[in-house]
Amino acid sequence: MRSKKSGFTNVTERVMKYIFTVCGITAVACVLMITIYMIISGAPAIGKIGLTDFLFGDTWYAKKEQFGILPLILTSVFGTLGAIVIGVPIGLLTAVFLSELAPKAMKNVVKPAVELLAGIPSVIYGLLGANLVKPLMYALEEIIYANDPTHQFTGGANLASAIIVLAIMILPTIINISENAISAVPSEYREASYGLGATRIQTIFKVVIPAAKSGIASGVVLGVGRAIGEAMAIILVAGNSANMPELFSSVKFLTTGIVAEFPYSSGLHREALFAIGLVLFVFIMIINLILNGILKKGGKKEKAAKTAGKA
């Protein structure tokens, strides 16, 4: 009986091992296929337009076959940075509140609400932005540029509106992952800090958050990924004009350029949109590689500090 059970267990383990291997190979194959497809689809346009003219040209005008995407790149960069500047502090402080300070009854209400926000479709954020954020930004625009006859009013469809909508959209991701990372910090860290005479706030900011920084950074990375890859919400609030980015100017992101123009594009225009997708793909990969490098470097420092402490 034992030999039969042992044989059955071995067969099961082998089958599961093959299943896991196939799943791993499938995941890698999907990434490779996407990469190859984007290169094959986007490279021809870059070759025809010229890499320098494509990346650093400041005019995007399909009718004249002028395909410079520098305004789109800068808009995506500044829009994402603006969302991070607003979203990360709010998200991190909310995560700290939920993990360290909130009464249990309040946490049981706030945390499910935050998790629910993560599941709201992007277009809903866009509709809210169009009906709530845009009027506020337009009112602010009228105040700031009331005496500027050269300013082209956007009706609130501008970079400022896009930044606020993106900041709201990345909040659930940053809050949920940061809260989990902070909650995972061992209680011994807090107790040791209190034993040394630190206050609760000092413990949070000097002990708990540094100990959870890898998890918090992961939340920020995912937030950046969502912000830079968002299209449906932004297309409703940004104005969709390929201008150099200014807070109160109508702008076009890399993603919204693809979504808005792909249905009616053809020829070199369509190839240029695929090239934008390739640039966006490479851009996200570079960001992830840089941040992963920072995390690995931080992990090595933590190990070195632990080793020194034991010594």
Image (spheres, grey):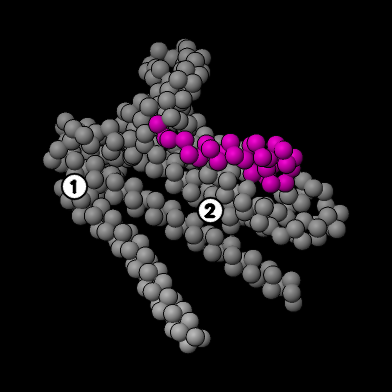
Up the image or down, 64 lies above or below 147; here it is: below
- What residue appears at the point 15 percent right and 48 percent down from the top-left corner? 48
Numbered label attached to residue 45: 1
Can residue 303 be seen at all in this image of the molecule?
Answer: yes
- Image x and y of residue 120, in percent: 47, 35
Tell me residue 104's x, y (percent): 73, 41
Extreme-bottom residue of the structure: 3
Left or right position of 308 against 117: right
Q: Which residue is mark 2?
A: 218
Task: Report the magenta residues as a range.
Answer: 94-123
Distance between the alpha carbons at the discs numbered 1 and 2? 34 Å
Q: Residue furthest front?
A: 1
Q: Quadrant of the C terminus?
A: bottom right
Q: Is residue 213 above or below residue 53?
A: below
Q: From the viewer's perspective, is 103 left or right of 147?
A: right
The amino acid beneath tag 2 is Ser
Identify the residue shown where x is 71% and y is 60%: 186
